[in-house]
Amino acid sequence: MNDLHWLEAGEAARLIAARKLSPVELTKALLARIEKYDGGLNAFLTLRPEQSLADAKAAEDAVMRGDALGPLHGVPFALKDIIDAEGWPTTAHSRLLADNVAAADAPVTARLRATGGILMGKLSTHEFALGGPSFDLPWPPARNAWGRDYSPGGSSSGSGAAVAAGFVPIALGSDTGGSVRNPASMNGLLGMKATYGRVSRRGVVPLSFSLDHVGPLTRTTADNALALSVIAGHDPGDPGSADEPMPDMASQLGRGIKGLRIGVIRHFYTKDLIADPEMAAAIEAALTVLEDLGAEIREIETRPLAQYAACNRVILLSEACAIHEKWLTERPGDYGALLIGRLLPGMGFSGVDYVQATRTRARYAAEFNENFNTLDAVVTVNNMEPAFLIEDFEAGEKHYPRQARTPFNVTGNPALAVPTGFSSSGLPLSMQIVTAQFDEAMGYCIAAAYEAATGWTSRHPDLDKTAAVV
Amino acid sequence: MAKQENQTSGLPEAVARAVGPERAKKAGEAARTAIGRLDRDNHWSQEPAHVYRAASWKAGAGQ
């Protein structure tokens, strides 16, 4: 079988269950691809090929015995290196945790393994899911699979690079101010930040307790829905976890979008910030596609982006500083410069500022969710521009605030990054589909219809050109 | 130990000393900018966002 590296997770699981594909063959193919190309992309921090192959062999034995198989049986996946896997390092890409080894699987890891997934490795991240891309850490930063001179975004940088490069079909990331949806945007992937509380964060190095989400990055909508359905579920060990039933996502994907009412927040990218013309044009073209598929498009207005951003920043940095205060005082030299620069302002906030931000958050969430009394979904921009050159520090600093993802960390709504094509320079473009609390299925339904109509997700980078170290 | 504030940056003195005056000053300026953008009101009520949940007192909650 050719091109095993572009096989969807769901399709691979079906072929494995039908004894048409060996999990060992699939794992070997992906390990060979990682071996060949990851020197140019730095997506992985830790690989254990022998362990992954042993797990694949066990999966193959289960198939041959006729055991009951889970939905990801024999399918490789990888984890952002803030998510625990028993016996594997969890470094958060930082000197401070360089020797940290996880004692147990995080519930999300356990769920992926319990459904048959094969852990391939731990992935590069911005330091502690905040500071990056950094060149002053023990490991180099991940690079973009569509062009290694570009950043893959972050903070789930390795997750974006690994999936786009065909190293794994599913990677998990985390999203506190957009860190799943940013690399999804910059690597041409689907990236889901589900409802706050939908996915357990236990066993995941925290950045901000009340804003952190764990979510999947994949190349297709169907795989993303599949991955979320596996990792979602109530966890009494995570105080933020919600006890809400998870609908059958797969049955929602093909239902079409005729008659759906979709709002568009244009002022985020035409007034609050001005998006790159190609990014804005791609969203307008996507809206036309959705309209042609039978959806009704209505423009809506919300609070300006800057208000959401300020609320997110005060909460995120206050909580992050509570976590890092001791190390900031005792081991500041062990952090990378970018992390220190982004984290430190949080030490200047007062208790009053934090409480005001949390009160503001509750009000913003209530206001925003009123939209779903009359709408099925909301579409808006993701990043304001495509990927920036990774070694251009100024471009990186300019890039990170120019986005429209933090509103949905503040409100807690599901927000799905969806590829909308490519810039004239060949870099991926993206939009977000935002839905009502716990209605991730609606976002997937719209994304699946759009994906089928446009085919953007069937394009892949040619790593011989894009990942080559010149 | 009482927390002392650095006069120049507004950051806690121990942190300002650990990271150096230049970084602390820059961080203090960034903090003031962020706070200036924060939406504030003077409504008061028992809001879910700042009420400690009674269930949290239960032994073992969140474990």
Image (tube, coloured by chain):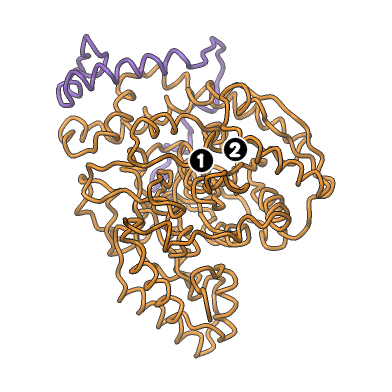
Residue at (54, 53) in percent of width and height: A189
Give the chain ID for the orange colour: A
Horizontal arrangement in the rendering, residue A154 relative to residue B21 (left or right): right
Secondary structure state at the residue bearing disc 1: loop
Q: Nearer the viewer, residue A210 or A96?
A: A96
Report if residue A240 is visible in the image: yes
> Which residue sits at x=67%, y=32%?
A369
Determine whether label 2 and label 1 are within 8 Å by CB. Answer: yes
| Residue A279 numbered mark, or none | 2
Q: In this rendering, is residue A117 above or below A407?
A: below
For label 1, the crowd category at 10 Å Cα-Cα, with few meaning under 14, some 14 to 19 and many 20 or more, is many
Chain coloured purple: which letter? B
Please say if A123 is above or below A340.
Answer: below
The residue nearer to you, when weighing A116 against B42, is A116
For badge 1, the amino acid type reads Pro
- Image point (33%, 69%), residue name: A35
Residue corresponding to mark 1:
A386
- The residue lying toward the viewer, choosing from A184 and A200, is A184
What amino acid is at disc 2? Met
Could you tell me how far apart the alpha carbons at marks 2 and 1 are, in whole angstroms?
A: 7 Å
Query: In the visual, does A372 lie left or right of A145?
Result: right
Q: Chain of mark 2?
A: A
- Percent coordinates x, y for residue A417 in the rendering: 58, 46
